[in-house]
Amino acid sequence: MAVTRPVDRPVAEALASIFLEVVVAPAFDEGAREILAGKANLRLVEDPVLGAERRPPAPEPLGSIRTVGGAVLVGHPDTEPDDPSLWAVLTNRPPTDGERADLDLAWRLVRGVTSNAIVLVRDGRLIGVGSGQSSRVDAARQAVAKAHAISGRESTVGASCASDAFFPFPDGVEVSGAKAFVQPGGSLRDSEIISTVDRAGGTMLITAVRHFRH
C-alpha cells in the first residue's frame, strides 16, 4: 500500500487490520511505528516524494529508451498532472459527486497500467484491472472477471471505469458493466459510444489526453 500523507496512529490501526506486506508513505509517526511493529513481516518504507504536491522532474531527461530493428525510440515519462476540471461531459447525464471522485481515482490508476488498460473503481476502491491485452474489450473482460472473482458479481454494479485510450467500439463499454466512464475520446465511433452510455443511463467524461504505458 502506498499512502500520500504521513501515517499516524489511527491510520496505522486501520492498516494493521488488513493483510499487508509493504507500506510506503512520506513518514510514520512514533504511534504508527508502535502499532505496525506488531505486524509480522511488514516492511515500512519512507518516501518523502509521495507527500509532494508535484513530483520533481526526472533526473534523466531522455526518459525511456526502446530499440526496435536497429531504430531507437525515446519517450518522455508520463508525469504531467491531470486536471479533472478540464474534462468534458458529453453524455446527457453528468456524473454525481461520488462518480466524479471514483473517475478521478480510476484515471490516476490507469496511468500506471500497461496498455490496453481498463481500471474499475467503486466507492473509492480499486476493484478490477485489465492490462496488456490485444484489444480493449478483452481488457474490460479481464477487469470485470478479476472484480467478480475477488469481490463478487455485485461489485461492478454502479462501478466507474477508466480507459487509458479511446473505446474503438461500444463493446468495451457494454462488457464493463460500469455506469460512469472516463476516457480520452477521439474514436471515429465516439458518438455511437456516447449514445450507448446514454441508453444505459450512464455518464462519460472525456479527457482529450491519453496515458500510454507499454
Image (cartoon, rainbow, N blue to C red):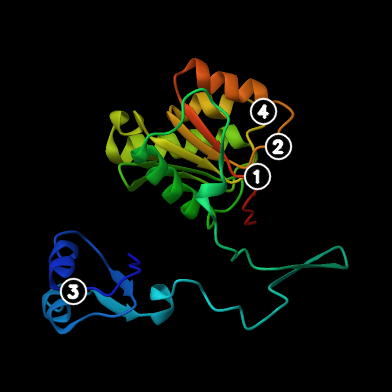
Left or right: 157 in relation to 165? left
Q: Position of residue 72 (x, y in %)?
A: 83, 69
Q: Which mark is residue 208?
A: 1
- Looking at the image, is mark 1 or mark 4 earlier in the sequence? 4
Q: Which mark is residue 8?
A: 3
Residue 170 visible, this angle: no
Q: How far apart are the alpha carbons under marks 1 and 3?
A: 38 Å
Position of the C terminus, as image quadrant, is bottom right
Q: How far apart are the alpha carbons under marks 2 and 4?
A: 7 Å
* Label 1 packing within 10 angstroms: few (<14), some (14-19), many (20+): some
Disc 4 marks a residue whose amino acid type is: Asp
Disc 2 target residue: 186
- Looking at the image, is mark 1 or mark 3 earlier in the sequence? 3
C-beta proximity under 8 Å, tags 2 and 3? no
Q: Does residue 18 sit above or below 142 in this rendering?
A: below
Quadrant of the rendered image containing residue 17: bottom left
Disc 2 marks a residue whose amino acid type is: Gly
Residue 44 visible, this angle: yes
Local secondary structure at mark 4: helix
